[in-house]
Amino acid sequence: MITVLVQFKLPQPFTRKKAREAFSATAPKYREVRGLIRKYYLLSQDGGTAGGVYLWKSLEDAERFYTSEWKNFIREKYGVLPSVTVFESPVIVDNENGSIVND
């Protein structure tokens, strides 16, 4: 599996309430993304940095998603371009399901 960390510095800090509103508005678009297992929206403690952690079935699924159109969407919504860092996830501990997944 693949984990992707997306981060961007906000032009103006977000409160938790503002972040929840902004993130909730975009969350439904991720429900049907092919290969996306899970997405966590992120907001730093000081409200100055936002982003997401994405868990993907494959690198191909992730690469298909992070297009220039997606980056432009982030820039239009938040005013900045995101950084995208890709990680291999060879082992995942899932305490909610009581499992350890070896990829």
Image (spheres, rainbow, N blue to C red):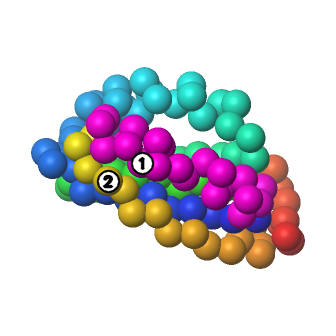
Specify the amino acid type for callout 2: Leu
Q: Is residue 31 visible?
A: yes
Q: Position of residue 64 (x, y in %)?
A: 66, 51
Q: CA distance from mark 1 to mark 2?
A: 6 Å
Q: Position of residue 49 (x, y in %)?
A: 28, 55
Which corner quadrant holds the C terminus? bottom right
Q: Position of residue 86 (x, y in %)?
A: 57, 69
Above or below residue 65? Residue 21 is: above
Q: Give the SS element for disc 1.
A: helix
* Magenta stretch bounds: 57-77
Q: Give the SS element for disc 2.
A: loop
Q: Nearer the viewer, residue 94 or 42?
A: 42
Res 72 → quadrant: top left
Residue, x 83% and y 56% (percent of image)? Answer: 98
Q: Nearer the viewer, residue 49 or 8?
A: 8
Is residue 95 within the magenta segment?
A: no
Per the rendering, the mark at residue 71 is 1
Mark 2 surroundings: few (<14), some (14-19) or many (≥20) residues within 10 A: some
Q: Give the residue pinned by disc 2.
A: 81
Residue, x 71% and y 63% (percent of image)? Answer: 59
Provide the major secondary structure of the magenta segment.
helix
Mark 1 surroundings: few (<14), some (14-19) or many (≥20) residues within 10 A: some
Does label 1 or label 2 sit earlier along the sequence? 1
